[in-house]
Amino acid sequence: MKDTIFNDYASFIQRIVTLVGQGYYYHKRIVLNELKKDRWVNTDRKLQSIFPVGASKDARYRRQKAGLANYFYMRWEGTIVMLCTNGLKVGQVKDQPYNPVQGDIFKDIRKSALEVCVGAETTLKIGKSYVKNHKKPKLSGKRKPTHKRKVQDQPMFSYTVYLSKSTFKNIKAGIIEAIMDNNVKKAEYIFNAMNGLPRYSGIVRQSKNMLEEVKSICKKYHVIFERDNFTVKSYRPFKKNVAGKPSK
């Protein structure tokens, strides 16, 4: 199956965000044991045999029309993320109580954000990003809406990537410690290292908030704050598909 095993976390996260935007709102994260790395492929095969993750585009369309949930399976290193859409889940019978099969306990990303650990001290969170200045789309020309042509609001939120609270606090603590030691170069290094993360709007927003806090901290400890030495990059290039070969 295409896009199953990913070789870097940036394309892994990018794929998740894309699928969530396409209606795959339900997520399940599984973290595999590093000591059992030689068995990860067996786990891939087992889960892919339980859930219809290898369905073609046409098959997914037919499942959607039949009211069945569609699934996607992805793994980066020892982190598995499974996504699915609305509809009858595997093992569920219409109008009967739902008894989930192994691993089929999914959370709604609209209510519970998905967290993915991408480093020893770095965890990213995928969740809602509310749209500012939400307005109804304007109608072109002088035509008035009828019952056949309704004006609907644009979505009030999209999906983006943030740093988890613990990751953000750890970065802030490192910067504060460096400033208290009057080591501005170290504070600049810690702050600018955030630019190495994928530049989603959530992370960019957090970087700008952190910059304001750094400014206040420098003022508090009477340390000279040089704005030009603290950079906030906002450009995020599209990551090409670098998924590995699917398990056979």
Image: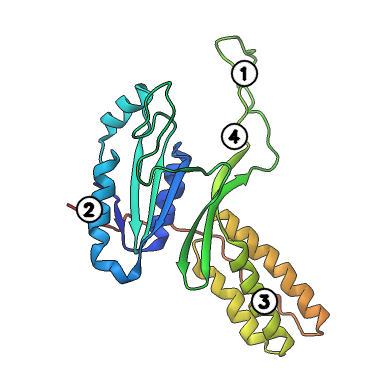
| Helix, strand or loop status at disc 3 | helix
Q: Is residue 14 left or right of residue 149?
A: left
The residue labelled by disc 2 is 246
The residue labelled by disc 3 is 173
Q: Residue at x 33, y 47 (%)?
A: 73
Could you tell me residue 18's position as x and y percent? 43, 45
Nearer mark to the viewer, of 4 and 1:
4
| Helix, strand or loop status at disc 4 | loop
* Type of amino acid at the residue the image marks with label 1: Gly
The extreme left residue here reads 248
* Type of amino acid at the residue the image marks with label 4: Pro
Could you tell me residue 215's position as x and y percent? 75, 74
* Type of amino acid at the residue the image marks with label 3: Ala
**Nearer-N-terminus badge (4/3):** 4
How far apart marks 4 and 3 lie (CA) works out to 36 Å
The residue labelled by disc 1 is 141
Could you tell me residue 50's position as x and y percent? 27, 42
Whether 124 is drawn above or below 109: the answer is below
Q: Which residue is drawn at 39% across and 38% down?
A: 100
User: Alpha-carbon neighbours of circle 3 within 10 Å: few (<14), some, or many (≥20)?
Assistant: few
Could you tell me residue 180's position as x and y percent? 74, 86
- Per the rendering, the mark at residue 155 is 4
Depth order, front residue of 1/229: 1
**Nearer-N-terminus badge (1/2):** 1
